[in-house]
Image (spheres, rainbow, N blue to C red):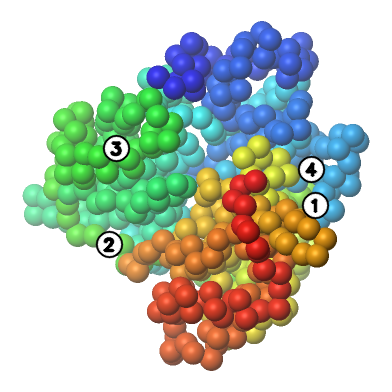
């Protein structure tokens, strides 16, 4: 049994929630928390949605938002709590802590969560009290349990939707949240559920993905789900496998419970490196895994029906007509997912002001957000709001596709800074590179380490943090750099990118991309996407194109020094 597993067995992880109230009441320091509860408490605190920042005494706290759907009231509370409590102390720069965002900002994540930084333990009960009033929670935002359940951010809105799966998302989330029987799994457990034909919720890279299907049963065609299992990124990325099963919407909770039970009983609890469910699916094979799930399921599952997924979208930026006549949703572009708490609260108030009583704020898996149910006559008013100027629904292609993880600003694992770099690079690339007019988005994802929080493997252009040794006349210089990948995508043509170049100095990336896009614009076939072009060019040729740029070159690469 590994050390983390021992910590989870010493005390049920959900018990830490009561402990947080004690720590807050006594205003305990990190040193005092560890003295009282041992080093394993940092692991158990994840079940409260809390990660210890690298700046001792402060936490990152993750708020779960099932399917990414928030009422305007909920979104306003999140923004106001951020503005009040996610405040950097003067010793770390205060309002000047970050030159792009100051402090009191939040991050929209690729799992439709909200993350806040600089939270003190003594402020957590106030946050939870304010959350309770509007039905929000941080419980199991992290830890080895069911994480936030993903969904299409436009659920219930788009014509290409087969059916609205948001009620199923909420039912599955409610079942697992604070459920002690399934809160201590071998590893994190990621579920996605969608009724959208475009698989916006990324079933191919989740532990469990329910996607729309239909099947004739007793002479009647029923809508439901097909199941995909065992997808994931990080080290050992794997696309999910489809099971031969049809799941009725009312049976989705029981099916997900049976999968969790299978993972709980058969998953590896000894080696953290191979604890994820995708390794279990790989080990057993999809057929035996399905058999194990059926053995643990209390309902009979019909065999599969007709798959209704037609591709992958994952982008809802811009003004879109809803299937409800006269209404629209607007997708706002938040580069790298970071914005001020006050700005998020402004967006929530705008949803209330210009939207109908059904208006909502939706978080997307590309770190952007939507405001829904805006009547035709109020769209221009919404677009004139101050926050809409910064988070434009009509961005350049690099800004539109930019995703960034937390980076070494706060994360103990990240090797490089990501958030500021992603925003600066996206805007600089939009200014410097003439992308063909028919290309709306270039997906550029930057992870600060190999953990893949920014999902670089599915991007047109993916980065993974490294350190690089440069040699010049003054001797060696260690600088921030990254592995450089090209050609990833999800959907019918799903394929993880190729890591084309290792440990590229950060300063060489933009010149290299200029060279690549010049070649792409000259060589592409009609309508050929950038990732498609990259796949058709030999990696050696791609490297040769990039190395033709006038930029620093690594000499004697030192990975991870």
As rendered, which of 404 and 513 lies closer to the eye?
Answer: 513
Mark 3 crowd level (few <14, some 14–19, many ≥20, 10 Å Cα): some
The earlier-in-sequence mark between 4 and 2 is 4
Is residue 361 rendered to the left or right of residue 198?
A: right
Label number found at residue 259: none
Q: Position of residue 108 (x, y in %)?
A: 62, 49
Labelled pair 1, 2 in contact (Cβ < 8 Å): no
User: Which label sits in the foreground, 4 or 3?
Assistant: 3
Q: Circle 2 sits in a helix, a strand or a loop, which is it? A: loop
Residue at the disc numbered 4: 104
Of the numbered discs 1 and 3, the one sitting upstream in the chain is 1
The span from disc 4 to disc 2 (Cα, nearest Å) is 42 Å
Instruction: Say which of marks 4 and 2 sits in front.
Output: 4
Left or right placement of residue 164 versus residue 331 in this view: left
Residue pictured at 27% horizontal, 28% vertical:
266
Position of 294 relative to 184 (above/below):
below
Q: Quadrant of residue 462?
A: bottom right
Residue 101 shows which numbered tag? Answer: 1
Question: Which disc is residue 280 wearing?
Answer: 3
The percent position of residue 226, horizontal first and vertical second, equals 25, 51
Pointer 2 local density, CA inside 10 Å: few below 14, some 14–19, many at least 20: many
In space, the residues marked 4 and 1 are separated at their CA atoms by 8 Å
């Amino acid at each position: 049994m590994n050390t983390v597993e021992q910590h989870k067995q010493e005390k049920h992880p959900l018990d830490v929630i009561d402990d947080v109230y004690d720590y807050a009441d006594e205003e305990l320091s990190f040193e005092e928390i560890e003295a009282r509860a041992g080093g394993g408490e940092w692991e158990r605190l994840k079940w409260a949605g809390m990660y210890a920042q690298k700046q001792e005494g402060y936490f990152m706290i993750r708020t779960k938002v099932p399917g990414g759907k928030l009422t305007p009231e909920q979104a306003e509370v999140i923004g106001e709590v951020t503005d009040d409590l996610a405040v950097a102390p003067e010793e770390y720069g205060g309002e000047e802590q970050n030159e792009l965002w100051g402090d009191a900002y939040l991050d929209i994540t690729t799992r439709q969560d909200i993350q806040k930084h600089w939270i003190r333990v003594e402020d957590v009960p106030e946050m939870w009290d304010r959350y309770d009033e509007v039905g929000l929670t941080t419980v199991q935002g992290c830890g080895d349990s069911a994480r936030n359940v993903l969904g299409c951010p436009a659920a219930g809105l788009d014509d290409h939707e087969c059916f609205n799966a948001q009620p199923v998302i909420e039912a599955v989330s409610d079942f697992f949240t604070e459920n002690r029987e399934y809160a201590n799994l071998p590893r994190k457990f990621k579920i996605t559920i969608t009724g959208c034909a475009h698989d916006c919720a990324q079933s191919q890279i989740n532990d469990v993905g329910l996607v729309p299907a239909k099947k004739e049963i007793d002479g009647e065609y029923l809508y439901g789900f097909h199941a995909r299992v065992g997808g994931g990124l990080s080290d050992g990325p794997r696309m999910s496998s489809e099971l031969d099963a049809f799941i009725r919407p009312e049976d989705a909770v029981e099916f997900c419970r049976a999968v969790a039970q299978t993972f709980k009983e058969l998953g590896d609890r000894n080696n953290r490196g191979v604890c994820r469910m995708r390794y279990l699916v790989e080990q057993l094979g999809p057929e035996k895994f399905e058999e194990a799930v059926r053995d643990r399921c209390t309902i009979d599952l019909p065999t599969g029906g007709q798959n209704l997924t037609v591709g992958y979208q994952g982008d809802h930026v811009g003004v879109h007509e809803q299937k409800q006549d006269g209404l629209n949703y607007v997708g706002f572009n938040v580069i790298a997912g970071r914005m001020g708490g006050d700005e998020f609260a402004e967006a929530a108030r705008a949803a209330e002001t210009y939207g109908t009583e059904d208006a909502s704020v939706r978080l997307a898996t590309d770190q952007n957000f939507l405001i829904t149910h805006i009547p035709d006559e109020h769209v221009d008013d919404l677009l004139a709001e101050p926050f809409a100027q910064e988070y434009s629904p009509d961005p350049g292609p690099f800004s539109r596709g930019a995703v960034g993880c937390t980076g070494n600003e706060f994360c103990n694992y990240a090797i490089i800074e990501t958030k500021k770099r992603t925003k600066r690079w996206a805007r600089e690339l939009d200014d410097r590179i003439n992308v063909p007019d028919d290309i709306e988005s270039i997906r550029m994802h930057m992870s600060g380490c190999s953990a893949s929080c920014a999902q670089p493997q599915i991007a047109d252009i993916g980065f993974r943090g490294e350190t690089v040794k440069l040699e010049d006349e003054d001797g060696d210089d260690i600088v921030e750099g990254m592995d450089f990948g090209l050609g990833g995508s999800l959907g019918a043509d799903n394929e993880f990118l190729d890591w084309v170049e290792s440990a590229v100095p950060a300063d060489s990336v933009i010149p290299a991309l200029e060279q690549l896009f010049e070649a792409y614009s000259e060589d592409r076939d009609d309508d050929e996407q950038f990732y498609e072009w990259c796949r058709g060019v030999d990696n050696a040729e791609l490297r040769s194109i990039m190395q033709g740029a006038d930029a620093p070159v690594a000499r004697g690469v030192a990975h991870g020094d």
